[in-house]
Amino acid sequence: MGAADAGTAPDGGQAPTPALPQGGREQQPAPAKDLPTLTGLYNVLAALRAGRPLTPKEKTIHTQGLVGVLRELHDQLDAAVLAAYGLPDGSTGDALLAHLVQLNARRAQEEAQGQVRWLRPGFQNPQKSHQNQELPALDSQAQEPDLTDEKPLAKQEQPPQTP
């Protein structure tokens, strides 16, 4: 039966239209029990990176969850991040930490001198750098605030009412 025959009954007549679900939890499909979870995928990935042989269950997760593809994507992402920080591919541990600490100290020194490297300047600092802006002069002709309708900040205690 093809896609064009979807509304046709086996005897050639019109097939009855199935009733639409009325909503509610009883109408929702049951969750797939045989699909691997994210935790399962990353546990298998960790086992692969550790060089540990996979159990039969982990082999099933590896196949169903395409853990090989996940590993390749993470390896590409890791290489791109290392390149963005100017580190050689495969840098790990102490060398990576030392580079990040040195970079952090450099950025702190730059910021102390007024140089800020915004990731999204249009969002983070829309009026350019507020440090470089001049403050408007105070207007000596400013109006005095109207305090006639002043309300207290704290809630006033009300005496209990008797019935």
Image (cartoon, rainbow, N blue to C red):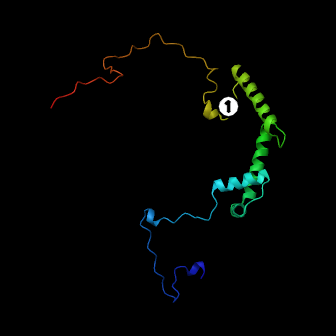
At mark 1, the secondary structure is loop
What residue appears at the point 41 percent right and 66 percent down from the top-left corner? Answer: 22
On-image quarter of the N terminus: bottom right
Q: Quadrant of residue 94?
A: top right
Residue 81, by quadrant, is top right
Residue that appears at 69% across and 20% down: 112
For this view, does 21 lie left or right of residue 55? left
Q: Is residue 133 above or below residue 63?
A: above
Three-letter code, disc 1 = Trp
Q: Residues within 10 Å of mark 1 (few under 14, many from 20)?
A: few
Note whether 104 is above or below 18 in the view shown.
above
Residue 114: % across, % down: 69, 21
Which quadrant: the C terminus? top left
Which one is in front, 121 or 22? 22
Look at the picture and state if 118 lies above or below 141: below
Comparing 71 with 113, the one in front is 71
Residue 91 in the figure: left or right of residue 150 = right
Identify the residue shown where x is 44% and y is 13%. Answer: 142
Find residue 156 and report its horizontal and vertical position in percent. 29, 23
Q: Residue at x 69, y 53 (%)?
A: 43
Return the residue at label 1: 118
Does residue 124 lie above or below 115 as drawn? below
Image spot of residue 99 (x, y percent):
79, 32
State how many labels appear. Answer: 1
Question: Where's residue 15, x and y in %?
Answer: 48, 82
Of the pair 87 and 138, the residue shown nearer to us? 87
